Amino acid sequence: MRFLSILMLLASALIGCEKPQPTVPRPVDPATLLTGGELVFSDTFERETLGRDWETPSKAWKIVKGRVRVENAQNAGLWLKRTLPNNVRIEFDAVSESSQGDLKFEIFAERPAHQEGYIGILGGWKNSLTVLARLDEHGSDRLERTDRKAKKGKTHHFAIVRRQDATLHWLVDGKSVHRWRDPSPLMGSHFGFNNWTAPVRFDNVKIFDLGDG
């Protein structure tokens, strides 16, 4: 009996160490996710340098013709030096200059560094997978699909939304790509763009505080 009790305790401890798994929330009309909120930050990058609102350890990030351009940053991201609201909508434009895709963002990171929050990649792994991951873009718990890719030269409009129910919604061009209801939502305050090697551009960032509603 005592041996059985010990086994049960060990099993409970192992279960407690498991990663929280996403649950599948009910579908939401994408149009309802793209409205409302107070605009608290915007950037069109119409200047010559990145400026004081952004930081990066890499020289790969530059402004070219009014857009942020990067190639071969190898996950040394470009991070916004502003605190994100807990309930937020972030919108921006993203373009891949090659058939490799790889349009990547990171959100709700605990610190401005790779894999400290959620990671979204449109057309990652040579444009073969579109992924939403939590802390590990290679993790077994990531959400993935093969039917959404980045189109070379196309301006894709991204929107990432989290409201009171802790579901993280990711939309591209007005359509839902992934949605993740996290039982233990990450509450970091950092947002950034990232890049492995493919040449890509980002532009027209807008951040809306959705408040407590």
Image (spheres, helix red, strand yellow):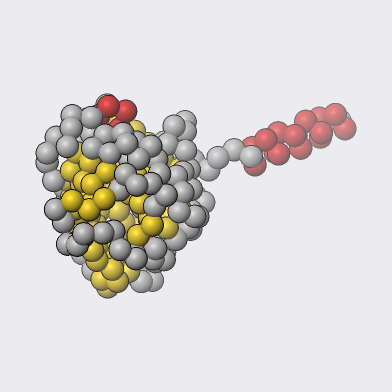
Up-down relation of residue 123 to residue 184 (above or below): above
Picture coordinates of residue 2 (x, y %)?
Answer: 87, 32
Rendered residue at 17%/62% (across/down) = 46
Residue 188 is left or right of residue 201, and the answer is: right
Q: Residue furthest right?
A: 2
Residue 61 is left or right of residue 174, and the answer is: right
Residue 24 visible from this viewpoint: no
Which residue occupies the foreground of this view, 203 or 212?
203
Rendered residue at 18%/43% (across/down) = 95
Up-down relation of residue 36 to residue 177 (above or below): below
Residue 152 is left or right of residue 206, and the answer is: left
Dividing the picture into quadrants, the one containing residue 152 is: top left
Which residue occupies the foreground of this view, 111 or 70?
70
Dividing the picture into quadrants, the one containing residue 83 is: bottom left
Picture coordinates of residue 48 (x, y %)?
Answer: 21, 59
Q: Quadrant of the N terminus?
A: top right
Picture coordinates of residue 93 (x, y %)?
Answer: 19, 51
Q: Quadrant of the C terminus?
A: bottom left
Rendered residue at 23%/63% (across/down) = 43
What count of labels does the image hold? 0
Q: Residue furthest left?
A: 154
Rendered residue at 22%/53% (across/down) = 63
Picture coordinates of residue 109 (x, y %)?
Answer: 45, 53
Which residue occupies the foreground of this view, 161 or 55?
55
